[in-house]
Amino acid sequence: MSLLDLLTGNTSNQVAEKAENKFGISRNQIIALLAVAAPLIISYLRNKSQDAKEAEALNNALDKDHDGSILNDSSQLEARESEGGSILGHIFGGDKQNVENQLSQNTGISIDKIGPVLAMLAPVIMGYIGKEKQQSNVGAGGLGDLLGGILGNASNQAQAQQSSPLNDILGSVLGGGQSQSSGNPLNDILGNFLGGSNNNNQQSQQGGGLGDILGSFLGGK
């Protein structure tokens, strides 16, 4: 399953329905958030996997807790939300609040809801990675290449297919995926995609990147 398949398939629709019912957020907003959050989380994990200890810890976590069953069992979504918060804290570390602020500004999801929604999405994304890991039969040493391959394949697929809001979001997110230079996914993905994470809030909200794409995607929602 490609990352684009995850975003357009039954799993994302089930996640969006659950989140819509629980948080009162439109399904399109949830799917758009997933389209940005998934590559961002994968990029952070790819960076972490360059450290042997982090790679081993991720490998163990995937083997133990993320076999991909959540992709076919929507009942796990709410049950694993608290676990999702811990996952995000480990992945993003000191960037967590900044990530949430940027995503809140550019998706229109309020700051008090963005964290809980991301916590619901995190185990799904980890489950997807775990399933890909099983199918590729890689261990800790191969995680960096696996995660890089997921991002590269998603970028190629988004660019090859006919333009659509989701393809445009994913293509923009992953546009610099092959040439990340700062070593910080927050800068490499969110910074470029959102028109610069150092811009003031008003400028970030008014134009550029995700804001413009979401304008058409979420129109009327």
Image (cartoon, helix red, strand yellow):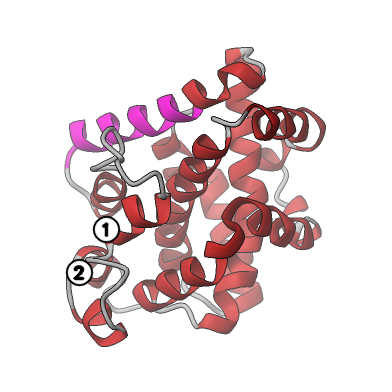
- Is 151 part of what is drawn in magenta? yes
Q: Secondary structure at mark 2?
A: helix
Image spot of residue 171 (x, y percent) = 25, 44
Q: Residues within 10 Å of mark 1 (few under 14, many from 20)?
A: many
Q: Which mark is residue 140?
A: none
Question: Does residue 104 appear to the left or right of 165 in the view shown?
Answer: right
Q: Which mark is residue 193?
A: 1
Instruction: Determine the residue located farthest toward the bottom in the rendered image.
Output: 202
Q: Secondary structure at mark 1?
A: helix
- Circle 2 residue: 212
Which residue is at a point 58% across and 78% down the rendered structure image? Answer: 113
Q: How many marks?
A: 2
Image spot of residue 30 (x, y percent) = 48, 64
Q: Residues within 10 Å of mark 2 (few under 14, many from 20)?
A: some
Which residue is at a point 54% across and 44% down the rendered structure image? Answer: 10
- Numbered range of the magenta stretch: 147-162
Question: Does residue 186 appear to the left or right of 55 in the view shown?
Answer: left
Query: Which quadrant of the view contains residue 57?
Result: top right
Task: Say which amino acid is labelled 2.
Answer: Asp
Image spot of residue 186 (x, y percent) = 41, 56
Question: Does residue 23 appear to the left or right of 155 in the view shown?
Answer: right
Q: Nearer the viewer, residue 154 or 189?
A: 189
- Is 160 part of what is drawn in magenta? yes
Which residue is at a point 23% across and 72% down the rendered structure image? Answer: 215
Q: Which SS type dominates the magenta stretch? A: helix
